[in-house]
Amino acid sequence: MRISLGAQTVMKEVRRLGINLHGARNSALDNLVKLAPPPIVADMLGYSYQVTERHAALAATTYSRYAQSLATTIATVN
């Protein structure tokens, strides 16, 4: 049996559990811009470049740290 949940249903349940959806989305975006350059994240998710650049600045990430971050991520996965 397949149960289909709508986005609104899931959102209401997550909020009922006390999870801050706005904060969770911002935190996820902050983490993504640490792993990839902000313009790439913007293109992947449909955000503007300004939004992802702002999140990168708030997360204290720059392009120069991208290669190091990527190498660390790959080493962690392997």
Image (spheres, rainbow, N blue to C red):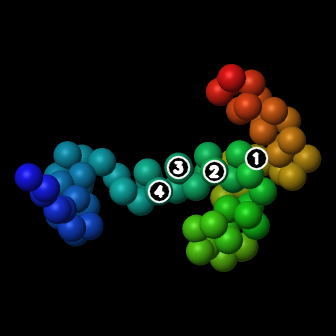
Amino acid marked by disc 2: Leu
Whether residue 57 appears in this view of the structure is: no
Given this view, does label 2 or label 4 mark the residue nearer the observer?
2
Q: How far from the left and from the top, in percent, is residue 19?
A: 30, 48
Going from N to C along the chain, the mark reached first, 2 or 1, is: 2
Q: Position of residue 73 (x, y in %)?
A: 71, 32
Q: How busy is the neighbourhood of tag 2: few (under 14 within 10 Å), some, or many (20 plus)? A: some
Going by the numbered disc 1, the residue's amino acid type is Ala
Amino acid type at mark 3: Ser
Is 8 above or below relative to 3? below
Residue receiving disc 1 = 60
Q: Is residue 18 left or right of residue 34?
A: left
Disc 2 versus disc 1: distance between alpha carbons? 12 Å
Report if the CB atoms under discs 4 and 3 are less than 8 Å apart. Answer: yes
Q: Secondary structure at mark 1?
A: loop
Give coordinates of residue 67: x percent, y percent: 86, 41
* Crowd band around label 3 with a 10 angstrom C-alpha radius: few (<14), some (14–19), many (20+): few
Instruction: Please report contact status of discs 4 and 1: CB closer than 8 Å, yes or no.
Output: no
| Marks 2 and 3, the one that precedes in the sequence | 3
Kind of residue indicated by mark 4: Arg
Disc marking residue 27: 3
Label 4: which residue? 25
18 versus 25 height, above or below? above
Q: Which residue is mark 2?
A: 32
- Mark 4–mark 1 Cα distance, whole angstroms, equals 18 Å
**Dot 1: few (<14), some (14–19), or many (≥20) neighbours within 10 Å?**
few
Real-space Cα distance between discs 3 and 1? 13 Å
Q: Quadrant of the C terminus?
A: top right
Q: Residue furthest right?
A: 64
